[in-house]
């Protein structure tokens, strides 16, 4: 047997509000009834007092009591007339023994008055509620005096309780009508409000809403991707754990404006933008994130949904993959050149010039091995050595001479575990790529690389013979998206931004200066000891002189076409 579905939240609220309105209205009606009845009794008592004292003070009444042998003959018509004009239910005139002379029911004349008369015989006018021949009534008893102040008779006037109740009932019915109208209007208003609430809650009951909230919270905090909800004023309305980690914000981010979160300027601009953003790459203090924004309109209140994906590892791997691709292309080119040289040696032998073939082959081997021996001898770190050899071959493919300075020296075991090789690849690889791009087309297309330990820091310096960097652009070159070259299919201007981020992560410094040949010199110093906590950006020092480094040291080993690829004209 299937259990009935619990009433929806809107239905429960409607029932509760309807009962609440009914209880309030019933309470008001009861209060009104009790209050009106009390007021009616008070008014009846005043009315009876006025009628009784008026009759007792009448001279005709006093005269009939004192002089007439049968006071009923003259007093009964008089009492009936007073009763009709004053609105009381009875006017009873009696002697001091309580024997009636008048009564609305003639059969009661001559009978004893039902009620108390003691206080009136003492000269006091009093009221009481008593059940007499007409039923329960509110009555007033007052004495009748002769000319000497002696009590000679009594007058009682009263209004029955049924009459008082009837008057109060009429007022209560009027109040009940108003209460019923209020209940109907309240019910209609409650129904309209709850119908709207039912639309917003999709007819779900409290249990379903609670379960949905629990699922929502679990899903929100379980996903690794970042999710941020911004309201119409660009304040953070909701943020999950993934977004807090990616953006580096605390638990107090909710309710704060995006501009107050301390995010990088380009990322803040993307979050504040009114137009949607699709797969934009941005950098935080230590991460590369892909940002997507989508505006949301709900009942004229605009907001924005922001999703964040962590591409830090992917971007690093892509950089390594690009280096490997370049190295592979260089190897393919060298294999082609090696085949040409082999054909040359074979041809020389076929021509009977064996000595010249031996000299040619020996010279090619010496030239090809020179850079490898020099790099491997100076750089014992295998990752950096492979990077320098690959970048040298890649630079040669672009017509750029890559020179490793003679003072380059990195012994094996020098680099601490706190300085990941991947960060070194990111820093040095992107600096060399940037220098090669800048040096292409210059009269002396050359890039000089220096890597050595200097004190307790690792010094990485890359100089190029390109056009250099204008002083006004010294800070902009490290911003994501800045480049002097046209954007490619995957965008430009990310390499130096990644360098700055990696240097900040390693607690190092980054310096930009002018080279002797007119190009630019980038110098990075990374601590070899304990790495301090990362900053949002490393200290970038900009100088305009050319004394930082010499782009063409005399004792450097060049990687020209003959050295890198073994290419030589026979």
Image (tube, grey):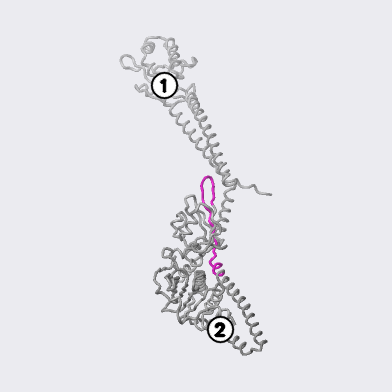
Closer to the camera in the image, 239 or 87: 239
Quarter of the figure with the C terminus: bottom right
* Residue 114 image position (x, y, % from top left): 45, 22
The answer to whether residue 181 shows anywhere in this view is: yes
Q: Which residue is mark 1?
A: 48
Q: Quadrant of residue 290?
A: bottom right
Number of numbered discs? 2
Segment colored magenta: 295-317
Kindly indicate whether the residue at mark 1 contacts the one at mark 2 (C-beta within 8 angstroms): no
Magenta span contains residue 233: no
Magenta span contains residue 305: yes
In the displayed structure, 289 sits above or below 365; it is: above
Alpha carbon separation for disc pair 2 and 1: 134 Å
* Residue 342 image position (x, y, % from top left): 64, 83
Closer to the camera in the image, 365 or 359: 359
The answer to whether residue 426 shows anywhere in this view is: no
**First in sequence: mark 2 vs mark 1:** 1
Instruction: Name the mark on residue 369.
Output: 2
Closer to the camera in the image, 59 or 116: 59
Furthest residue toward left: 148
* Residue 390 image position (x, y, % from top left): 55, 76
């Amino acid at each position: 047997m299937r259990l009935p579905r619990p009433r929806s939240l809107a239905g429960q609220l409607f029932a509760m509000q309807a009962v609440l309105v009914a209880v309030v209205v019933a309470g008001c009606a009861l209060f009104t009834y009790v209050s009106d009845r009390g007021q009616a009794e008070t008014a009846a008592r005043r009315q009876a007092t006025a009628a009784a004292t008026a009759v007792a003070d009448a001279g005709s009444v006093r005269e009939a009591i004192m002089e007439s042998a049968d006071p009923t003959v003259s007093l009964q018509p008089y009492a009936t007339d007073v009763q009709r004009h004053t609105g009381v239910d009875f006017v009873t005139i009696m002697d001091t023994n309580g024997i009636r002379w008048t009564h609305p029911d003639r059969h009661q004349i001559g009978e004893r008055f039902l009620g108390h008369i003691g206080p009136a015989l003492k000269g006091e006018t009093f009221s009481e509620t008593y059940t007499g021949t007409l039923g329960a009534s509110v009555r007033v008893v007052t004495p009748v005096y002769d000319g000497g102040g002696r009590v000679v008779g009594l007058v009682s006037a009263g209004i029955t309780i049924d009459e008082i109740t009837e008057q109060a009932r009429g007022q209560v019915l009027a109040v009940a009508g108003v209460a019923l109208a209020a209940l109907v209007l309240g019910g209609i208003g409650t129904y309209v409000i709850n119908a709207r609430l039912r639309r917003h809650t999709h007819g779900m009951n409290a249990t379903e809403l609670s379960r949905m909230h629990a699922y929502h919270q679990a899903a929100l905090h379980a996903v690794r991707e970042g999710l941020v909800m911004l309201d119409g004023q660009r304040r953070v309305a909701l943020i999950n754990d993934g977004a807090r980690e990616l953006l580096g914000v605390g638990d107090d981010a909710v309710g704060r404006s995006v501009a107050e979160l301390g995010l990088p300027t380009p990322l803040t601009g993307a979050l504040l933008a009114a137009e949607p953003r699709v797969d934009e790459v941005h950098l935080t203090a230590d991460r590369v994130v892909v940002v997507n924004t989508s505006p949301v309109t709900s009942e004229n209140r605009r907001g924005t949904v922001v999703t964040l994906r962590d591409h830090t590892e992917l971007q690093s791997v892509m950089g390594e993959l690009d280096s490997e691709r370049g190295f592979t292309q260089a190897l393919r080119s060298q294999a082609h050149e090696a085949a040409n040289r082999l054909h040359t040696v074979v041809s020389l032998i076929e021509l009977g010039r064996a000595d010249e073939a031996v000299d040619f082959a020996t010279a090619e081997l010496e030239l090809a091995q020179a850079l490898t021996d020099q790099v491997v001898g100076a750089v014992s770190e295998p990752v950096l050595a492979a990077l320098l050899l690959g970048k040298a071959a890649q630079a040669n493919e672009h017509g750029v001479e890559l020179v490793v300075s003679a003072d380059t020296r990195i012994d094996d075991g020098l680099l601490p575990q706190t300085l990941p090789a991947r960060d070194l690849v990111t820093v040095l690889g992107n600096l060399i790529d940037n220098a090669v791009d800048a040096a292409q087309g210059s009269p002396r297309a050359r890039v000089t690389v220096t890597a050595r330990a200097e004190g307790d820091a690792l010094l990485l310096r890359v100089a190029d013979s390109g056009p250099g960097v204008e002083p006004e652009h010294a800070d902009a070159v490290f911003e994501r998206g800045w480049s002097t070259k046209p954007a490619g299919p995957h965008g430009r201007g990310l390499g130096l931004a990644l360098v700055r981020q990696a240097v900040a992560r390693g607690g190092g410094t980054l310096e930009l200066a002018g080279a002797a040949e007119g190009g630019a010199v980038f110098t990075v110093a990374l601590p070899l000891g304990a790495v301090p906590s990362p900053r949002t950006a490393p200290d970038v020092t900009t100088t305009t002189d050319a004394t930082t480094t010499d782009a063409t040291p005399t004792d450097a080993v060049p990687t020209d076409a003959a050295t890198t690829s073994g290419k030589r004209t026979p």
